[in-house]
Image (cartoon, rainbow, N blue to C red):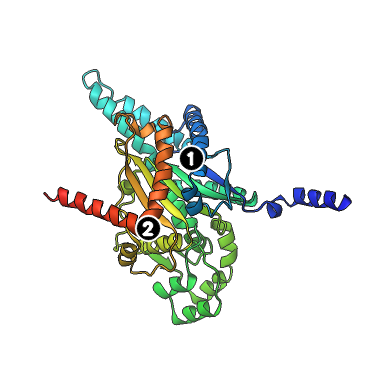
Amino acid sequence: MTRVFILLVMCLFMQNACFANNGVSFIYINGSDSNSEKDRVWFEKGVGKFHPLLVDKIEKNKKTIGAQFNDYKYKINPKPTIFFWGDESKDDIAFMRAQLDLTKSPGAPAAFFARSMISAYLHDAIWVSKPPHMAPVLEQLNTLVKEEHNKGNKVVLFGYSAGTFVTYEYAFSRIRYIDLKELFDTYESSDAIKKFVAANPHKNTCLAAIARAKIGAATATGDIILDNVDARVKENYLKIDEATESACAPEDTTLGVINYASPLVLFYSDITDPKYQISHFNKYLLKHFMENGLFFVTVNFREDPLGIPAARNLTIDEMEKSTSLQLVSPKGIFYENSGVKSWRSFVVAHTSYYSARRIFSSAVVKTMVDGHDFLYDEEFQAKMLKKRKRAEASKMR
């Protein structure tokens, strides 16, 4: 009896070790025009009503659980985790609204209404897409992800509207998919440094750690510049593991990303532009997701004017052709569904994902299942490709 009691006490003090990797926290990230306490309450209430419904539908769908949550190894936590960044931009948007009030005219109420609506939806999107504003938001999110990791939880990032910029930037800069040898072989560095890196291998790191270790950085023009002083590079390179632990997401903690009401492509349409060196890393981010069983899915209401389709869904063969990379034993998912009928007017569709939570939660589950089947079920893929071919043919008529 004494031995059992001691074991129980040890488990209480070593909770992460005893219950590690048994929970999944959905981290909900807010979007545009969410700058006040009232907006925070609206977001938290909406998520609070939506999350239990989504969890129930995911857990009842055996195929979704099997494909995306590792055959019941993980259980989704019943309470949502909120990451609210909107209050960071409240001073800026207050100034903008004051300036808009100066344009108010009795003779042009429609124009004033249009300016107000456009400004409300786009201000935060533009604000958070700027690197000086995005950086602290990502740092705060990384702190939250680390807290969940320390509790023994995996995480799924759930990005709404401009929150999709945060999920994308987090994956792009904080996930550990950068092979250091490949980095130095690809970008300008001396033969001595290349040999030094090859002789001193380290685990994968992330873009944020490369900058934090002062090895290199991305420029405003989309170029990657590595330090060209060999002695300094060698010294900083040997500290890369410390920078990785500090700047990157904990290893194997992020299961995937679910974006919705997403205008991501409107602001990040250059992420595949070959003129930008930094777009090179998107190929390796895709490879990492696909080979490690992560998912990146997007759900948009078709009536949502800001839910902008990013691109057609690609098969694995098309992904390999597009990236010129071979995907080894792929099991991840990249998939988008922008045709969900919300039965809402286009005026309110962008803010109705929680009021239409039954439709939206069903769409999330269906998108995850369809995304898996499109990539790994030959019969389903053939059916979807045939449908895509007919749609493309009708557009050319």
* Element type where label 1 sits in the image: helix
Real-space Cα separation, disc 1 to disc 2, in angstroms: 22 Å
Identify the residue shown where x is 50% and y is 42%. Answer: 60
State which quadrant residue 282 falls in.
Answer: bottom left
Q: Position of residue 329 (x, y in %)?
A: 44, 67
Q: Position of residue 24 (x, y in %)?
A: 56, 47
Residue 129, can we see it?
Answer: no
Q: Is residue 50 above or below residue 207?
A: above
Identify the residue shown where x is 45% and y is 49%. Answer: 257
Q: Is residue 164 above or below residue 278?
A: above
In primary-sequence order, the first of circles 1 and 2 is 1
Asked whether 217 or 280 is in front, the reply is 280
- In the current view of this chain or complex, which residue is farthest to the left? 397
State which quadrant residue 259 falls in.
Answer: top left
- In the current view of this chain or complex, which residue is farthest to the top? 106
Q: Is residue 237 above or below residue 335?
A: below
Report which residue position mark 1 lands on.
Answer: 57
Identify the residue shown where x is 32% and y is 65%. Answer: 317
- State left or right for residue 180 relative to residue 338: right
Q: Position of residue 251 (x, y in %)?
A: 56, 59
Tag 2: Cα neighbours inside 10 Å, few (<14), some, or many (≥20)? few
In the rendered structure, find residue 377 and report the number of the disc placed on it. Answer: 2
Tag 1: Cα neighbours inside 10 Å, few (<14), some, or many (≥20)? some
| Figure label count | 2
* Element type where label 2 sits in the image: loop
In the rendered structure, find residue 265 and report the number of the disc placed on it. Answer: none
Residue 279, can we see it?
Answer: yes
Tell me the kind of residue under disc 1: Lys
Q: Is residue 76 above or below residue 219?
A: above
Tell me the kind of residue under disc 2: Asp
Asked whether 240 or 104 is in front, the reply is 240
Foreground disc of the pair 1, 2: 2
